[in-house]
Image (cartoon, coloured by chain):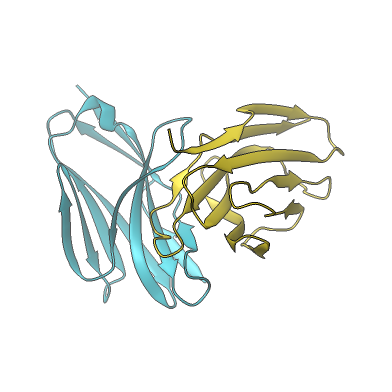
Amino acid sequence: GQNIDQPTEMTATEGAIVQINCTYQTSGFNGLFWYQQHAGEAPTFLSYNVLDGLEEKGRFSSFLSRSKGYSYLLLKELQMKDSASYLCAVREGETGANNLFFGTGTRLTVIP
Amino acid sequence: DGGITQSPKYLFRKEGQNVTLSCEQNLNHDAMYWYRQDPGQGLRLIYYSQIVNDFQKGDIAEGYSVSREKKESFPLTVTSAQKNPTAFYLCASSLRDRGYEQYFGPGTRLTVT
């Protein structure tokens, strides 16, 4: 089974940095993924981590610690358009190669 | 343009009726998925298919059925047996060996009264 936790809501200021945390408990861990979802729209893939460490992609970075069951998504130089829900998802290698289990999402509001 | 489409965007049905949601992709992806999203809950996997003519139940398959007769299409039927069918339904697809990078359709919001 899986247990994925992330904060329900966060607020940050335009131009600032925000860190969205995700903790998980799962068997057969095979990767952690972040998706962005604007209200009423489909999720879009942001990043994934399979090994420990930081993956950077422009203004977004994602970190993973497998021993701690912990990941975070770091958003720098926040823009108003970054207001969205950010979904943390875990893949389990044992239950199917591509099945992702999603957390409830963190709704980020960027204010001027 | 390549992409994944779902239609319609909004669907209304009376309780007791079966309804089929369409999902089509022209990305040449082998794998396709159906999720359900409810307020305050994460996406939950209903069914998935890794290849044509094969599909597997996800976490919440009860009350739903699917078919995968063509690579491009993965329709979902919400049957009258589904106790709480009102939800936002998302279809996704991926390359079989890149399942972490799933491409989502725009979703269908189903309301059953």
- Regarding residue B42, the answer to whether it shows in the image is no
Q: Position of residue B46 (x, y in %)?
A: 63, 55
Q: Position of residue A67 (x, y in %)?
A: 26, 77
A72 or B21, which lies in front?
Answer: B21
- Seen at 66% across and 64% down, the residue is B54
Residue at the outermost top position: A112
The quarter in which the N terminus of chain B is drawn is top left
Q: Position of residue B56 (x, y in %)?
A: 65, 65
Residue A95, placed above or below residue B15: below
* Chain coloured yellow: B
Residue B49 placement, left or right of B78? left
Residue A73 placement, left or right of A41? left
A54 or A11, which lies in front?
Answer: A54
Q: Position of residue B106 (x, y in %)?
A: 51, 34
- Seen at 24% across and 25% down, the residue is A80
- Seen at 41% across and 70% down, the residue is A25
The quarter in which the C terminus of chain B is drawn is top right
Residue A10, placed above or below residue A99: above
Residue at the outermost right position: B16
- Regarding residue B39, the answer to whether it shows in the image is yes
A60 or A12, which lies in front?
Answer: A60
* Chain coloured cyan: A
Residue B92 placement, left or right of B8? left
Q: How many marks?
A: 0
Choose top left, top right, bottom left or bottom right for residue B112: top right
A58 or B72, which lies in front?
Answer: B72
